Image (cartoon, rainbow, N blue to C red):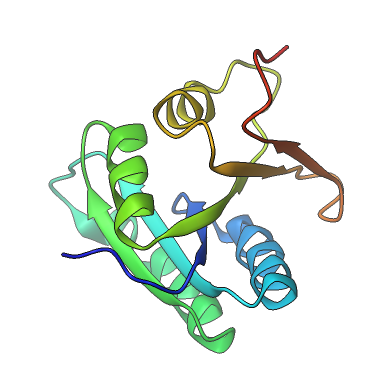
């Protein structure tokens, strides 16, 4: 796949219903920045897809309602896959959830691989509260 020309906002979700807030936050950013909106759901490989089907279908419908394409991938290295995907779709921003009081290896690894990609993490408690990491950030607390 060759890189797309128009910049995009990439939203990374897990198979949880409350990730709809991430898609909505990504939509707001994409609209404000005149970017395409793309949603990516990465899971480790599973034998039984039915355990994910309802949540994934809900997130897919949410993405479609907001005009976004949603890609579902199965990979053991989610940060690498997300960084590669972000490059291919010309992502300028990444929206993801805020970790629950634990280090977020996903965000740190993507930031190391793509230091110029702006990363916005959205909290569960207040979907309008954003923590943004940009290329000038050196470390995370």
Q: Is residue 114 above or below residue 32?
A: above
Q: Position of residue 95 (x, y in %)?
A: 60, 51
Q: Residue at x 52, y 23 (%)?
A: 108
Q: Position of residue 33 (x, y in %)?
A: 69, 70
Q: Is residue 104 rendered to the left or right of residue 69?
A: right
Residue for point 26% across, 31% down: 77
> What residue is rendered at 32% in x and 37% in y?
78
Q: Nearer the viewer, residue 126 or 36?
A: 36
Q: With respect to residue 86, does 137 lie above or below? A: above
Is residue 26 or residue 51 the one in the foreground? 26
Residue 29 occupies quadrant: bottom right
Left or right? Give the position of 51 relative to 116: left
Q: Where is residue 134 drawn, in percent x and y?
A: 66, 35
Q: Would you place residue 118 above or below residue 114 in this image?
A: below
Q: Nearer the viewer, residue 17 or 117?
A: 117
Q: Quadrant of residue 117?
A: top right
Quarter of the rendering containing residue 51: bottom left
Q: How many marks?
A: 0
Task: Say which residue appears at 36% left-offset and 34% top-offset.
Answer: 79
Q: Quadrant of the N terminus?
A: bottom left
**As displayed, is residue 24 above or below residue 128?**
below
Tell me if 45 is positioned left or right of 94 in this view.
left
Q: Quadrant of the C terminus?
A: top right
Closer to the camera in the image, 75 or 2: 2
Query: Residue 110, percent across and down?
Result: 44, 32
């Amino acid at each position: 796949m060759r890189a797309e020309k128009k910049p995009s906002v990439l939203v990374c979700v897990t198979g949880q219903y409350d990730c709809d807030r991430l898609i909505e936050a990504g939509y707001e950013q994409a609209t404000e920045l005149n970017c395409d909106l793309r949603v990516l759901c990465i899971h480790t490989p599973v034998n039984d897809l039915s355990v994910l089907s309802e949540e994934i279908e809900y997130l897919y419908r949410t993405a479609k309602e907001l005009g976004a394409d949603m890609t579902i991938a199965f990979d053991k290295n989610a940060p690498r896959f997300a960084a590669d995907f972000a490059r291919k779709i010309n992502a300028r921003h990444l929206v993801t959830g805020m970790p629950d009081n634990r280090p977020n290896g996903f965000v740190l690894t993507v930031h190391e691989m793509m230091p110029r990609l702006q990363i916005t993490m959205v909290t569960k408690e207040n979907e309008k509260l954003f923590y943004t990491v940009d290329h000038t950030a050196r470390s995370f607390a």
